[in-house]
Image: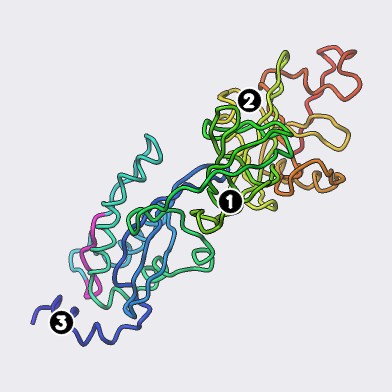
Amino acid sequence: MSLPRQLRDESDFDQLPNDVPVAATIADIEEKKGFIDYYVFVIEVKNKGSSKYLIYRRYREFLQLHQLLETKYSGEGSESPGPATWSLPTLPGKIYLGNKREIAESRIPELTLYMKKLLALPTWLLLDEDLRMFFYQSDVDSMEQPQNLRRLRPPRAECKPFACRVLFDFRGSGTTELNLKKGQLVFLLRQVNADWLEGTVKDHTGIFPQSFVKIIKPLPPSDCDNAEGPSYSCLRCFLVQPHASDTRDVCVQEDLGHEPAYKDLLSRMRMVFQKEDIALNYRDLHGDLIRLLDDEDVLLMIQQSRLRPRTQDRPDNQFLWELHVTLTSDLSVYTPTGQRENMQADNIRVHSYF
């Protein structure tokens, strides 16, 4: 009897623990809106005990798993492969350019086939710790609420429209988000998830955070798809220019205690305001602008924001700190408060913390 046949013998399979994964398929993709937007694959896993559950994995996690398995089992470069070597399936290559959603969609059949071949490997390889941890449902996975699962079930009907009143001004940071003014009436179309609604105002349709409005008549829970979902927090951002200014509310899938990396903030602000040559700043406790240069500056900004008195006129899910975006070459904005009109250019200070 050949080795593969021995390893795939029914008795060997019967001795596997019930929590070993034996089948997996990608049910959908979901966009995660952190300071850097990305997509995850929603994977339905079936284990030997016939239980099914969902896990959420990025492409880079597929890549990390594949590299670990190659290190242990591929035997490439070895003149005499050992008994614990095996030919692994080919992982689809990384794509560096293109629309993120289109890339993720195109990878669904390829990664589903990759997982099918991976879980058809010899029984002894299915017990690999890294392989099992990849398909294991973590606490984070179990807390996620799937959105559509298009490949497992048809989408539900849209919610019936109801209405809400705007409590706080909101400036959307993307084309899919509405701009709202305090006091406006918005007609609701559907509940996107626990934090976001879709509605229409003045012939414009888009999404907006629920924390910025007061529901006049709630949407029927039985009619709403995705009534639960991930929590969002909103960041107030200002573009400060010599003769104009702009305000945006950037909502991200992070909690209020999140401490973002400087490079992620810079990348997101470039995308929001469509400008490359920009500097990131915050206002200190005296009201002066302080330029951010690195991660330590970001932590200092967050720490100082916690010393400010909490104002009532803001949503509960809004970050305490705010970003002031300026042009890199514009140093006039760094004049201390109360002296901006009187100071000369050669007396301008750029405040920075290292």
Part of the protein shown in magenta: 82-90
**Which residue is under mark 2?**
278
Cα gap from disc 2 to disc 1, whole angstroms? 42 Å
- Corner quadrant of residue 88: bottom left
- Corner quadrant of residue 324: top right
Q: Residue at x 17, y 83 (%)?
A: 9
Q: Where residue 286 is drawn, which disc sits there?
A: none
Cα gap from disc 3 to disc 2, whole angstroms? 63 Å
Q: Where residue 219 is drawn, which disc sits there?
A: 1
Amino acid type for the residue under numbered disc 1? Leu
- 3 lies above or below 150: below
Amino acid type for the residue under numbered disc 2? Ile
**Which residue is under mark 3?**
6
Across and down, in percent, residue 105 comes to: 34, 45
Give the structural element (helix, strand or loop) at label 1: loop
Amino acid type for the residue under numbered disc 3? Gln
Q: Quadrant of the C terminus?
A: top right
Q: Residue at x 81, y 41 (%)?
A: 313
Cα gap from disc 3 to disc 1, whole angstroms? 58 Å
Give the structural element (helix, strand or loop) at label 3: helix
Tell me the mark number nearer the camera, choosing from 3 and 1: 1
Q: Is residue 88 magenta?
A: yes
Tell me the colour scheme of the image: rainbow
Q: Nearer the viewer, residue 230 or 48?
A: 230
Across and down, in percent, residue 93 comes to: 30, 47
Q: Residue at x 55, y 24 (%)?
A: 274
Horizontal placement of 18 versus 187: left or right?
left
